[in-house]
């Protein structure tokens, strides 16, 4: 019985991890869309768009790599 509970707990943790990763990916995609929109509308660089959107410095490198 204990093994079954451990497996159920592991499955729940894996589900939560996947769910959280999916949410984070969705937020990143939304931010990328916002950056692209600002770049197009204001005819500015990626870096300037990130500044305009007040994207935290620690997240900028990741988004720049995805653009």
Image (cartoon, grey):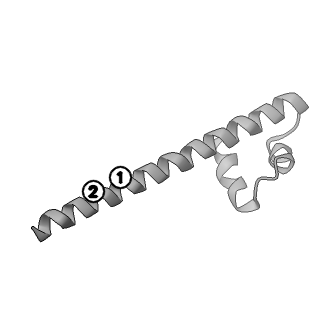
Q: Which of the image's four quarters has the C terminus?
A: top right
Residue 63 in picture, x, y percent from top left: 67, 48
Residue 59, relative to residue 63: is it above or below? below
Q: Are marks 1 and 2 in contact (CB under 8 Å)?
A: yes
Figure disc tally: 2
Residue 35 in picture, x, y percent from top left: 76, 39
Residue 31 in picture, x, y percent from top left: 69, 42
Q: Which mark is residue 15?
A: 1
In the foreground, 51 or 4: 4
Provide the residue designation for mark 2: 11
Residue pictured at 20% horizontal, 67% vertical: 6
Q: Which of the image's four quarters has the N terminus?
A: bottom left
Q: Is residue 63 left or right of residue 48?
A: left
Residue 11, relative to residue 49: is it above or below? below
Residue 38, relative to residue 17: is it above or below? above
In the foreground, 39 or 8: 8
Residue pictured at 82% horizontal, 35% vertical: 38
Instruction: State the CA–CA distance, disc 1 to disc 2.
Output: 6 Å
């Amino acid at each position: 019985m204990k093994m079954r509970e451990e497996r159920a707990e592991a499955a729940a943790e894996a589900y939560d991890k996947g769910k959280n990763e999916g949410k984070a990916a969705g937020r990143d995609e939304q931010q990328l869309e916002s950056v692209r929109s600002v770049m197009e509308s204001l005819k500015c660089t990626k870096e300037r768009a990130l500044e305009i959107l007040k994207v935290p410095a620690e997240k900028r490198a990741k988004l720049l790599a995805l653009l």
